[in-house]
Amino acid sequence: MGGPDAWLAPPSPSLVKVWSADGEFRGTGFFIAARTVVTCAHVVEHDEHVIIGWSGPDLPGRVLVRDPPARSGTRYYPAPDIAFIGVETLDNPHVFMDPSAVGRDLKEFFIEGFSTLNPTGGVALERRLVPVLGESDRYQLLSDAHIVPGMSGSPVVEREGSENVRGMLKSGKLAQGNSAYMIPTWEIKKAFRLNKAVLRAHMKSLPTLVRPRPGTPLHMLLTAQREVAKRYPYRVASLTRREPPPLSSVYVEQRTQASATGRAKTPLVLSPIELLHRHRNALIVGGAGGGKSTLIQQLVAASADWWLREPGGGTEPPLGRVVAVRAAAQDLLGGGAWYASLARAVNNDLGGRLDTLLAPEHFERPPATGADWLILVDGLDEVLDRGVRRELVDVLGFRVSQYGSTNRFVVASRPLEDREFGRLRTSLTGSDRTKRYGEYDLRPFDWDGVRKFAGNWFRPADGEHSPVEPAEFLDAITTAGVAPLVEVPLLATIAAIVFEEKPALPLPLDRAGLYKMFVRVLLTLRVQRQGCASPSGSSSRHWAGRPRNSAIGSSRTGSPA
C-alpha cells in the first residue's frame, strides 16, 4: 500500500468532509466538477445547507440535487442514492471519473474517506483496502467489515494513488449482512447529465463583481497602477523634438508559445489573455529585452482599467475574475511571512503613487467578492544567488499547488535550467495539472508586430507625433537587413530612438553596432542640452557615473531585459 509513509500523506485534494450547518459530521464526498461536490443522497438526507471541509478554507454548500429526492418510507435509501452539493469557490480540484467496466478479476478496491470512529475522537482520515465480494445487479458488492460509518460518499479507486475514480461508496448494514455497494461511475455521470441544467446553472452562477468605491484601499491601488502603466520598465532617453510616447500607446501584444513537451506536433500559440483563461497559474520565459516586464505592466494596466470603469462597462474583466498586481521577485525576498512580502513588493512597485502603504492584511482577503489576486512575479532570474532563488521558487511552487487560495500566479523569467523551473510544478497533483499550470515562451515580434510598433512609436494615439514617418523607419530596417534584430522589443525601441534622432544615417547591421550608436546618440543629446562643444571630457565622465538603469538598454541589473 505504498509503505508506512503513505498512511501519513494528506488526503486527496478532491476529498471533502460534509458537515451539517450546525456542525454535525455527516459523511464524505468529493469534488466532481467546478464548484460541485458529489456524495450519497442519504448523507445529506436531512440537510439543505451544509459546510464542506477540505484542503482549502471551509466552504458553505447547498444541496442542489438528491436522486431520488427522498427515502419515501423505505428502509434503505433507494438507488441511485446520489446527491450534488454546490459550493462557493473559484478554485477546486476534481477527480477523473472512469466509466469503463471493472474487471471481474479485481479482488479489492482502495477507499479513502472520513469517520469519527478512530483513536483521535474527532473526524479523521480513513484509508482502507476493501475486498470485493461479488456483484449485486449493476453494483459491486464490497465487504462492510473494512468500512466505518462516515465513509459513505467516498471515492473508490482500483489502487492507492490512482486518479481514475471507479465509483462511490454506499455503506451501511444492508439486508444481506455485512456488505456495502459501489455506485458505479457511469451511474453518477448519468445523474449529472439528468440534472445538468441545475448543476451547470450553479457552476456558471458566479457572484456579481462590484467595482471599488473611491477612497477604498483597492481603488487607491488601481488608480496608482493606472498611472504606473504609462511608464516604461526602463528609463527612456529623452528625444530632441518631442516627449517619448507613453508605453500604453506604444505597446504591441506579443504571443506566447507553449514550451516544448516532446508530444505536441504543432506548438500551441496563445495571446497572454488566452493563456490566463486556459491556466490558473503560468510561467513565461523570454530572452533579454524580450518584453516580459512590459507584458506584465500591460496586464496590470488592463486589469486596473476594467476595475476603474463606471458600472456597466463590461460584465467580466478581460483577464478573468482577478485584480492583477506586479511583484518584483527581488522584493519578495527577506524570509518574512508571505503576505508581508507581497505587500512590500506591491508597495515598492507603486511607490509614491500610493496615498498610504498597503498592509499585508489587504492581500489575505479576496480583492472583491468573486475575484482572486493575480500576482505577476517579474524578474525571477534577477535573483542572482541560486540558493536564494531556489527558496523563492519553492515558496511559489507551494503557493501554486494550494487549492482554495485567492492567489493566482504568473512568473516571468529569462531562461534558467529546466530543473529550476521544474520546482514550480513538483507539488502539482491530480488530473487537472494542465489547467492549473502552464509553461510558455514569449515569442518575439513578427514583421506585422514590427509594423504595429513603428506606427505606435512614431504616431502614438495618446502622445505627440514624430516628424519621422513610420514607413521611413521600416524602410531603414529593410535596407540595413536588421529585421531579425528588431524582433526583440527592446532592440526595436532602441532602433526607433536612434533612427528618430539620426534619420539621415543608416541603421547599424548588428546588435553591438546598434548599442554603440545608441550610446553615441545619448551622449550627443546630453552634450547638446548642457551646451558643451563635444561629447568628451566632463560630460562623458558625468554620463559614465549615472546609474546603470538610467536609460533604455539597461535593466534593473544593468543589462537588457
Image (cartoon, rainbow, N blue to C red):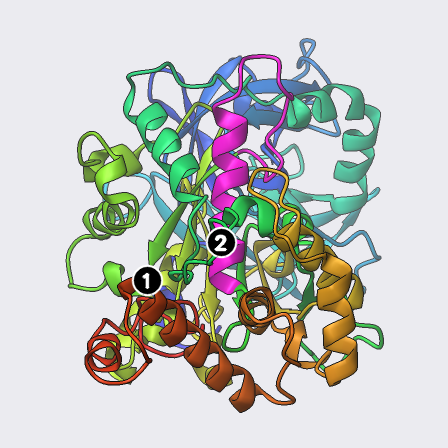
Q: Which residues are magenta?
A: 292-321
Asked whether residue 139 is in view, the answer is: no
Residue underneath mark 2:
296
The residue positioned 53% from the left and 12% from the top of the image is: 48
Count residues near mark 2 (Cα–Cα under 10 Å), then give few for <14, some for 14-19, many for 20+.
many
The residue positioned 66% from the left and 14% from the top of the image is: 71
Could you say where residue 355 lies in the image, as x and y percent from the top left?
21, 29
Amino acid under label 2?
Answer: Ile
The residue positioned 58% from the left and 26% from the top of the image is: 85
Secondary element at tag 1:
helix
Task: Report whether 189 appears left or right of 358.
Answer: right
Q: Can you say whether 36 is above or below 161 in the image? A: above
Could you say where residue 469 lies in the image, as x and y percent from the top left?
72, 56
Residue underneath mark 1:
529
Asked whether residue 371 is in view, the answer is: yes
Residue 345 shown in magenta: no
The residue positioned 62% from the left and 67% from the top of the image is: 440
Count residues near mark 1 (Cα–Cα under 10 Å), then give few for <14, some for 14-19, many for 20+.
few
Task: Report whether 489 appears left or right of 357.
Answer: right
The one of 222 and 335 positioned closer to us in this rendering: 222
Which residue of the protein is positioned furthest toward the top in this rendering?
Answer: 73
The one of 515 and 540 positioned closer to us in this rendering: 540
Secondary element at tag 2:
helix
